Each structure stands twice: as C-alpha cells, then as structure tokens.
Amino acid sequence: MSNSSWKYAGCIVLTILAGCRTVNEGTQYFQPDQPTGSEVLIYLYRPATLPRAQVAIYVNATKIVDLTRSEYTYFYGRPGKYVISTQWPSGAGIPNQEIRFPAGGGETYYVRLTGQLEVSSPGSGELDMRNVSTLELVPKDAAHPELKECSYFQPLLERLQ
C-alpha cells in the first residue's frame, strides 16, 4: 500500500471510530466548588472540532479521562508542576501533544484540546490529508463560552494526589 493510501485508510478508521462511543448524555457545563488554597482545579476539554477520535488525556503520567468532541472534565490536584499529554489511538496518525505548567494553590486552569483536518496538494496532484491537534492553556474568558457547548464526562480520578 502506498504512503497516501495509508493516510486515507487512517482517515477512514477515524471516521469509523467516531461512531464507536456511546453518546454522552452528561450534564452541560457547571462550575464545581472553587479550589482551596491547598488545591488547584484543572479543566480538560475538547470543543466540537475534528478529529472525532477519542483521545486519552494523562496528567503527570496518570490517565485521567478519554474525551471525544464536545466533552469536558475537571479534577482537583495539589499545587505544583503539571505535565498534561494526549495519547491518540494507534493508526490515527495524529501526533501526541504535551504541555507543562506550574499550578498555584487556589487557582483554576483551563486546558483545551483542539484539532483540524489539514488538506493540501504538495504539487504532485495528490491530496495530502492529515489530522493535527493542539493542546494549550487558555484564559477563563475564552474557555467558558466553549465549555458551555460541552457535556461533562466523569474522570477516572477526581483528585490527583
């Protein structure tokens, strides 16, 4: 199979995987209790952007949640250094992302995972299609309107030690 055929096959697999998750009928965005001075509150969310595949999100090497489009979760942790990373399904062809940041006690942080399908024609006449994603800290005023369009999904851990 040629390299471009593998890319198209990957896109087809992603499309199929998009229908494999049960629709989340979770509640819409709500604000949990504010963190105390000895805690941080971190939201993880995916607006309604491509790719559709479910992605695992890890915090300090601990899996917290699998999110699909238009879902969010949150957890409490201790102040300190955080490494948040993604793990896309094998064969998805999407590079994993990672961000690092210090988190101060009593603070709330919003981590957004977005993506898009990039299509280009490198001059050979064939279309080059690939999914790309970004993982970034965003300010509260940017996160809140997007979170209101998402459904809550229960994390594997509500408190990270």
Image (cartoon, rainbow, N blue to C red):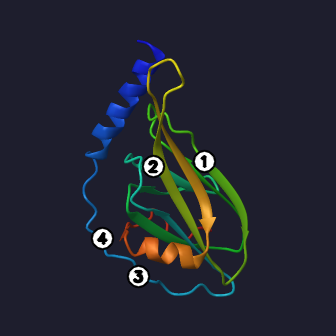
Q: Earlier in the sequence, mark 2 or mark 1?
A: 2
Circles 4 and 2: CB distance less than 8 Å? no
Indicate the amino acid at tag 3.
Phe
Residue found at x 60% / y 84%: 35
Residue at image x 43%, y 62%?
A: 47
Residue sitting at x 60%, y 47%: 97
| Disc 1 element | loop
Which residue is tagged 4?
Answer: 26
Contact flag, marks 3 and 4 (Cβ < 8 Å): no
Say whether disc 3 or disc 2 marks the residue closer to the N-terminus. Answer: 3
User: In the image, what residue type sits under mark 2?
Assistant: Val
Q: CA distance from mark 4 to mark 2?
A: 18 Å
The residue indicated by pointer 3 is: 30
Q: Secondary structure at mark 4?
A: loop
Distance (Cα) linking label 3 and label 4: 11 Å
Answer with mark 4 or mark 2, whichever residue precedes in sequence.
Answer: 4
Residue type (three-letter) at the residue carrying disc 1: Gln
Q: Give the residue pinned by disc 2.
A: 55
Question: What is the CA distance from the residue labelled 3 to the residue labelled 2?
Answer: 22 Å
Can residue 62 be spotted in the picture?
no
Q: Which mark is residue 83?
A: none
Label 1: how many Cα within 10 Å (few below 14, some 14–19, many 20+) = some
Residue on which the image places disc 1: 97
